[in-house]
């Protein structure tokens, strides 16, 4: 039921099989199966395998000419049509398209019977229509649906922003949201009571379930929860960590962009209800003034809140994040901060930086040293869509959006994260550098999150002063060109991969090759020698300048 989320680009909407059948240029004809208007397609795939199960992701229109079906398949028992169709259904296939000619003159009767038995839509593709033409038509329909959905979301965002600027912003935002989703929008207070509501009044069962869902998100790390009751889609969004305000939404249906629209409304309501209620705005303003007047970071950190570490020293994570698509804006950056449990967000250029308070147990990291100063721990993100499984929120304690105890901020759907080690305020600049390097590695390895993690190692046996002096002497030939040292560090951290280093540094792979060749020439070293690579890696770790 739980689902942590931030407003990101919505997934591409599926298309109706009926829309595909309505294309006169294709001449497709449905033979059997559920009504085409009830069938949605997420893509098209061609396969002549007798068992297409391993090659389907789910939701596809599977196209085949029956090459794998013997010509004598008209005889009973010559081909297992039932097993073939059952595997397609088990893989989540949306429909089956059978091409007539050149292999078969008609659709085999056994295939028709099997599709009818399993409820799989069967479409006849005429000889004049190519499979590539069918696939192109599917993608064209999906592109149109995607464009329409993006327009709807853009219009909704503009409308919600305009509503937030009205004299009665909270009721206006709720009315606009309820109208867009054709349902009910409710703002719950810290005690769980309805503060304001708009839209059609649901039944008692739905109203009670929505209130219970709102109470659920206030008592769990997850900032979002969803449920379905009596055919009505429910969703609850916590408006910032620790304040107790919740946005509840009940709608009769759920389109692909509805979550994005509701998330934007949640961010606006969080801004409208949070600052004057909690007083955190005044505390942060005071912290900023003190920093500008010369106070030390550790002196103003208590004004920002956060977890307590050993010796009552507040520890923090620095998170660098980039959206998977497009450039970050103020709304998406604020939503990311809310999902991670912190209002301290800086959206500059193409990277969003978030300062996240660490729970008491997050005092240090473990894991292999695979990057930079102390290494990095990688969490590979799932293939698109990247989102946590429903029904399982983050484990352990800590702010919303945190992972298992001690693991730091969790991966967020639609974002690539680099997370520093938990540090005291005096070490924020070093943590900022850690997060930047972790983000570069996450992008290069296409991981959802990479976390900097420290543990004792052989390098700690050398006194820091001596190690730094040796590092400066060893790397002196390239010390005057920062780009060379940066490229060498990234290249070594990525095990000599030209392509991944180019991605991490946002340069061409030939530029990486030229820089590494220049490093080898200036250092007079064979960079193919693992001993040389190890020595240079230790030197780069100790070269702080």
Image (cartoon, rainbow, N blue to C red):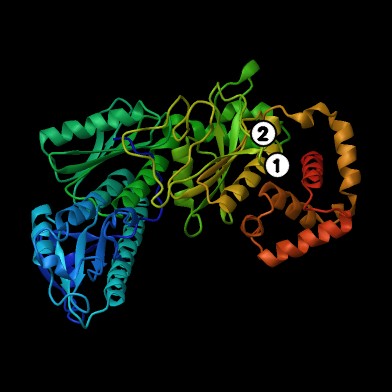
Give the class, few, some or many, for how many residues have Cα within 10 Å of label 2's Cα (few <14, many ≥20).
some
Left or right, 176 with respect to 314, comes to left
Q: Position of residue 156 (x, y in %)?
A: 31, 57
Residue visible at 74% across and 49% down in the picture: 489
Q: Position of residue 101 (x, y in %)?
A: 20, 78
Considering the image in quadrants, where does the C terminus appear?
A: top right
Q: Position of residue 543 (x, y in %)?
A: 81, 42
Which residue is tagged 1?
372
Secondary structure state at the residue bearing disc 1? loop
Residue closer to the observer: 380 or 116: 116
Q: Is residue 297 visible?
A: no
Considering the image in quadrants, where does the N terminus appear?
A: top left
Answer with the quarter of the image where residue 64 lies: bottom left
Q: Is residue 512 visible?
A: yes
Secondary structure state at the residue bearing disc 2? helix
Q: Which label belongs to residue 400?
A: none
Residue closer to the observer: 230 or 25: 25
Q: Position of residue 209 (x, y in %)?
A: 19, 32
For marks 2 and 1, the one nearer the N-term is 2
Q: Which label belongs to residue 290?
A: 2
Residue projecting furthest to the top: 311
Answer with the quarter of the image where residue 111 lies: bottom left
Left or right, 461 with respect to 205, comes to right
């Amino acid at each position: 039921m739980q689902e942590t989320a931030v407003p990101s680009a919505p997934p591409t909407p599926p298309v109706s099989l009926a829309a595909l059948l309505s294309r006169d240029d294709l001449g497709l004809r449905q033979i059997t199966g559920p009504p085409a208007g009830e069938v949605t397609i997420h893509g098209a795939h061609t396969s002549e395998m007798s068992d297409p199960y391993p090659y389907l992701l789910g939701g596809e229109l599977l196209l085949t000419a029956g090459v794998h079906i013997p010509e004598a398949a008209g005889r009973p028992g010559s081909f297992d049509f039932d097993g073939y169709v059952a595997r397609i259904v088990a893989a989540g296939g949306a429909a089956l398209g059978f091409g007539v000619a050149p292999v078969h003159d008609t659709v085999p009767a056994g295939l028709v019977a099997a599709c009818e038995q399993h409820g799989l839509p069967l479409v006849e593709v005429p000889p004049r229509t190519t499979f590539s033409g069918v696939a192109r038509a599917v993608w064209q329909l999906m592109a149109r649906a995607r464009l329409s959905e993006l327009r709807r979301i853009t219009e909704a965002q503009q409308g919600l922003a305009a509503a937030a600027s009205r004299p009665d912003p909270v009721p206006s935002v709720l009315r606009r949201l309820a109208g867009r989703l054709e349902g009910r929008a409710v703002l719950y207070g810290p005690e769980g009571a309805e503060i304001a509501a708009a839209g059609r009044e649901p039944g008692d069962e739905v109203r009670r379930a929505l209130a219970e869902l709102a109470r659920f998100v206030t008592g769990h790390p997850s900032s979002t929860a969803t449920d379905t009751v009596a055919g009505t889609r429910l969703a609850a969004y916590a408006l910032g960590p620790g304040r107790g305000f919740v946005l509840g939404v009940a709608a009769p249906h759920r389109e692909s962009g509805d979550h994005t629209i509701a998330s934007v409304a949640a961010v606006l309501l969080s801004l409208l209800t949070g600052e004057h209620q909690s007083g955190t705005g005044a505390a942060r303003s005071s912290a900023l003034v003190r920093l500008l007047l010369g106070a030390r970071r550790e002196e103003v950190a208590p004004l920002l809140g956060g977890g307590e570490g050993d010796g009552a020293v507040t520890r923090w994570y620095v998170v660098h994040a980039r959206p998977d698509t497009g450039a970050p804006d103020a709304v998406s950056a604020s939503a990311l901060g809310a999902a991670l449990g912190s209002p301290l967000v800086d959206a500059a250029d193409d990277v969003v930086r978030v300062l996240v308070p660490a729970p008491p147990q997050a005092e240090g990291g473990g894991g292999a040293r695979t990057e930079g100063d102390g290494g990095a721990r990688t969490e590979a993100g799932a293939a698109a869509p990247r989102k946590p499984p429903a029904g399982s929120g983050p484990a352990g304690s800590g702010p919303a959006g945190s992972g298992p105890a001690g693991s730091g901020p969790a991966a967020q759907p639609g974002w690539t994260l680099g997370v520093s080690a938990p540090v005291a305020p005096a070490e924020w600049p070093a943590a900022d550098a850690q997060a930047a390097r972790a983000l570069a590695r996450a992008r290069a390895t296409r991981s959802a999150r990479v976390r900097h993690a420290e543990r004792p190692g052989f390098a700690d046996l050398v006194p820091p002063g001596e190690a730094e002096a040796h590092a400066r002497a060893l790397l002196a030939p390239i010390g005057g060109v920062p780009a060379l040292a940066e490229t060498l560090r990234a290249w070594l951290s990525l095990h000599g991969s030209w392509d991944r280093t180019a991605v991490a540094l946002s340069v061409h792979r030939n530029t990486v090759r030229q820089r590494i060749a220049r490093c080898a020439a200036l250092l007079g070293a064979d960079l193919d020698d693992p001993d040389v690579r190890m020595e240079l890696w230790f030197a780069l770790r100790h070269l702080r300048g």
